[in-house]
Image (cartoon, rainbow, N blue to C red):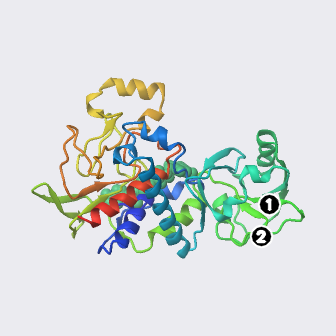
């Protein structure tokens, strides 16, 4: 498994379940370590299946099959992360709205239990104390409380609690791992900036903007057991990959999963034309090789920067990545996660695509 994000982790979970002997190789934390704290899995299965280039539609599963795989991937993930102290609640079938540190709402299907009580519907009719820390410069609880009131009609107010031993010009990241301070306000739900531990029973964490304590906790939990190394090239023979090289080490295997992420992870390289740097695999935009689109793609990106985010690898039904011409170069290579194109990376499948394609790639690879 090449990649230490959520896709590589789900691939490893599935492969381990099939008793595969596996190694996860990861260079560094990627986009998973930055996620805001609410996992978007899927919103409308029928709409996804109706989009021919969507990575989940390309799996060739019908709505029932997709639902069954999502159920087993997510419950296995919840079980595995729970053992590492990250307790996720919710399912792809449920959807809630959660406020971030600026009071803006973001939808999510699966969230850490420390976030769950902050679902905006749950807060209606309650008083909410938003905890501020005056020593922290990059967060303003009064502004968050005001946004909660104005945007979501929640009866929110700020309560500042000083933490004396913070460094000068402290940032939100300096709160990470500290015990949550207790507010004076009684009888209110308590919204904390993310990062504190030991929240009181009526406390919850707001979602983060990067750098994200939620992402960091998740990344630490999934990184256990991974080998830190950068794969720089592959050995191949007769349409198969036989080894992945990192410095003077070669990892040999019967099957390989590439889950190297998008631009932040390092799986795609931006430039005049976006490329896949390790194996020069095809990069597609809405089913067409990006290299064939010339200036048209640049014009689209100029009109809407999100177009760049829909670029990525294209796979067959078994998650084998393709060349530009649609052929499958390696029969034992599988691709998963945010490196796949055809969906809105920042949208309703932000975690759904990495989780499900990782989960299936791990199954297919371990049956190789
Ligand atoms: C700022 C931000 C906030 C987000 N917030 C949310 C959110 O709140 N909800 C949501 O649903 N989605 C969110 N997303 C999207 C979501 O985080 C990503 O889709 C998901 O984490 C991607 O997972 P991944 O495993 O595919 O890639 P990554 O997590 O990027 O992992 C890629 C891994 O591959 C490794 N790698 C790359 N090249 C090599 C190499 N040559 N050798 C070895 N290892 C290599 C990297 O080091 C990294 O470990 C957010 C994304 C960003 C950027």
Indicate whether 322 appears above or below 81. Answer: above
Indicate whether 307 appears above or below 108. Answer: above
Is label 2 in contact with label 1 (beta carbons under 8 Å)? yes
Ligand 1 under 8 Å from disc 1 Cβ:
no
The residue identified by callout 1 is 190
The residue identified by callout 2 is 200
- Residue 247 image-quadrant placement: bottom left
Work out which quarter of the rendered image holds the C terminus and state it. bottom left
Indicate whether 5 appears above or below 53. Answer: below
Question: In the rendering, at what x and y percent does residue 171 appear?
Answer: 67, 58
Residue 31 seen in render: no
Question: In the rendering, at what x and y percent does residue 187 appear?
Answer: 89, 63
The image quadrant in which ligand 1 is located: bottom left
Question: In the rendering, at what x and y percent does residue 33 appear?
Answer: 51, 59
Residue positioned 44% across, 73% down in the render: 224
Residue positioned 48% across, 28% down in the render: 304
Q: In this view, does 139 lie to the left or right of 261?
A: right
Secondary structure beneath disc 1? strand
């Amino acid at each position: 498994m090449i990649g230490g994000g959520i896709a590589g982790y789900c691939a490893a979970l599935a492969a381990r379940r099939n008793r595969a002997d596996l190694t996860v190789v990861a260079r560094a934390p990627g986009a998973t370590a930055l996620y805001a704290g609410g996992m978007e899995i899927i919103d409308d299965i029928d709409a996804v299946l109706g989009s021919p280039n969507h990575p989940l539609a390309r799996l060739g599963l019908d709505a029932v099959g997709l639902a069954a795989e999502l159920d087993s991937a997510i419950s296995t993930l919840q079980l595995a992360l729970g053992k590492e102290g990250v307790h996720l609640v919710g399912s792809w079938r449920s959807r809630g709205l959660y406020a971030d540190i600026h009071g803006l709402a973001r939808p999510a299907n699966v969230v850490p239990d420390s976030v769950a009580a902050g679902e905006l519907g749950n807060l209606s009719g309650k008083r909410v104390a938003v905890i501020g820390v005056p020593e922290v410069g990059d967060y303003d609880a009064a502004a968050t409380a005001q946004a909660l009131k104005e945007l979501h009609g929640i009866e929110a107010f700020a309560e500042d609690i000083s933490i004396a031993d913070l460094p000068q010009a402290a940032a939100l990241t300096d709160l990470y791992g500290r015990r949550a301070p207790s507010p004076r306000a009684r009888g209110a739900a308590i919204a904390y900036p993310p990062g504190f531990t030991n929240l009181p029973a009526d406390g919850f964490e707001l979602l983060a903007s990067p750098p994200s304590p939620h992402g960091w906790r998740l990344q630490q939990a999934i990184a256990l057991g991974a080998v830190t190394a950068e794969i720089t090239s592959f050995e191949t023979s007769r349409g198969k990959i036989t080894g992945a090289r990192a410095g003077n080490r070669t990892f040999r295997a019967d099957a390989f999963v590439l889950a190297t992420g998008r631009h932040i992870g390092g799986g795609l390289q931006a430039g005049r034309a976006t490329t896949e740097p390790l194996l020069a695999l095809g990069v597609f935009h809405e089913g067409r090789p990006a290299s064939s689109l010339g200036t048209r793609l640049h014009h689209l990106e100029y009109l809407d920067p999100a177009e760049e985010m829909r670029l990525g690898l294209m796979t067959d039904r078994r998650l084998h990545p393709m060349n530009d011409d649609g052929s499958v170069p390696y029969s034992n290579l599988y691709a998963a996660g945010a490196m796949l194109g055809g969906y809105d990376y920042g949208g309703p499948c932000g975690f759904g695509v990495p989780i499900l394609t990782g989960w299936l790639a791990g199954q297919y690879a371990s049956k190789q």
